[in-house]
Amino acid sequence: MNALQRTAVVFRREFRSYFQTPLAAVFLVIFLFLAGLFAFNIGGFYDRNQSDLRPFFQFHPWLYVFLVPAVSMRLWAEERRNGTIELIMTLPFGVADLVIGKFLAAWAFTTVALALTFPMWITVSWLGTPDHGTIFVAYLASALLGGAFLAVGAFLSSLTKNQVIAFVLCAVACFVLLLAGFPAVLDFLRGWAPRGVVEGLASTSALTHYESMMRGVIDLRDILYFLLVIAAFLVLNIFAIDWKKSD
Amino acid sequence: MATRIVARKLEKRFGHIHAVRGIDLEVPAGQVLGFLGPNGAGKSTTMRMITGFLEPSAGTIHLEGIDLAEDPIRAKRTFGYLPEGAPAYPDMTVEEFLGFIANARGFRGRDAKDRVERAIGRVNLQSVRRQAFETLSKGYKRRTGLAQALLHEPGILILDEPTDGLDPNQKFEVRELIKELGGDRAIVLSTHILEEVEAVCTRAIVINMGAIVFDGTPAEMESRASRETTKNRMDAAFRAMTTGDVDARTSKGTRR
């Protein structure tokens, strides 16, 4: 078996495992319910009288802050708790096969959840004439943001066998990643910090990159940002597993 | 016969704790090796190094001639391993779990199905095959773990406390199975139960404080007990070797 086939075996088991517990159903229902609630009630989807999905996408980062950790917290913490980490680490897999396979399964799962919001797209197309390109890019941005948060969460999950700790750490980390680009925080800093620092901070924020994509602009730097965050945390994850596998 | 496991000068340190101190081990095909020692002696740590779960602080391991450090994935194909407590995914059924193991071992489609069927038949799991792992009794969990370990018919089997926590009937079954599996395989099993060593093993190794203090046949081990002892001579020999009685530590062991 080559690395791709091994990763596929890990992916299949992991992806199926979501549907063997109530986790999948609970997650999908809550995600779809909240995504709709935010878009219609807080975002004023109808009141704006514009045929776009801004009110819908605008809340995704904040939804992901507490929903993504619920998916990622179990990735490694559960393997440690069950003792199955000893089993999978002694099967003929490489650490990278396991880390990437598990991450991709989690990402596929949250992407399925995101894809199930397609009625929003249909609704807005039926009511008006939205810019489909913009909506597609916004979906892509949302999927990438979810992936970046998952990579952070997978890494943090590998540091502990306690899922609650993994959840809280991930939620805080994702929150910080967003907050660095939140207008209120940046305005506060602008008062006294040098401009370079403020802009540097804003460019490390997932929110800045997400919002620029949400407007429908495909900038390679934004996509690269998300892919770099994912890659960096997966590499950290591999090191963490090698380093702490017996704890 | 071929030597399937070769470990040289294995060392393992966890911070300040020197858990394994220079263990040398060679296990040829056809041997059933019993790994004995008090809790915390380094049995599990040694097995975890041989299976590649833990990296040794020093020393080398070759499985079927493959260097574990150099080519871990190929080396891991050579053995089946039952970790302590026989862990598996609680929500998967026995069949699904063994299916995953078959895929992980590189079997696909029909081939994978056949392997799962054979493993289920081998350890008598037919009646629980569609049951979730977490709902199984301890005995069935252990059997699932054994099925998983021998699914790809490896030349090496490493079993960490395969009978721990089982009732006498289940213990008997597992022992019979291990005896059947012997043949051309190299089997290493750890246990606290000395009668088990007499029942299934062709060789016994006693580890104390990270070093080998005895290496020989079960009969030889029994003969180490003092002459006055008539009952439980294995136990007496074990106690003499592992309770710090220096005279009891023997010539063949690597004492440090």
Image (tube, coloured by chain):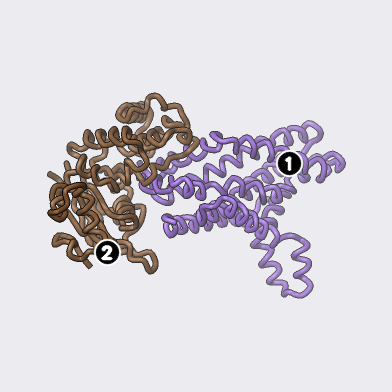
Chain given the colour purple? A
Pick the residue in front: A195 or B33.
Answer: B33
Q: For mark 2, what is the residue? A: B21
Within the image, what quadrant is residue B8 found in?
A: bottom left
The image quadrant of residue B151 is top left
Are there few (<14), some (14-19), or many (20+) residues within 10 Å of tag 2? many
| The disc label shown at residue A34, or none | 1
Q: Amino acid at mark 2?
A: Arg
Q: Nearer the viewer, residue B73 or A199?
A: B73
Q: CA distance from mark 1 to mark 2?
A: 57 Å
Q: Using residue B210 as the reference point, say whether residue A61 is left or right of it.
A: right
User: What's under tag 1, amino acid-wise?
Assistant: Leu
Characterize the local packing of mark 1: few (<14), some (14-19) or many (20 or more) Cα atoms within 10 angstroms. Answer: some
Q: Residue at x 32, y 35 (%)?
A: B168
Color used for chain B? brown
For residue B176, side relative to residue A4 (left or right): left
Q: Residue furthest top?
A: B127
Quarter in which the C terminus of chain B is drawn: bottom left
In-front residue for pair B58/A217 = B58
Q: Name the mark on residue A103.
A: none
Does the rendering let one see residue B143? yes
Where the N terminus of chain B falls, by quadrant? top left
Q: Nearer the viewer, residue A244 or A238?
A: A244
From the viewer's perspective, is B163 left or right of A152?
left
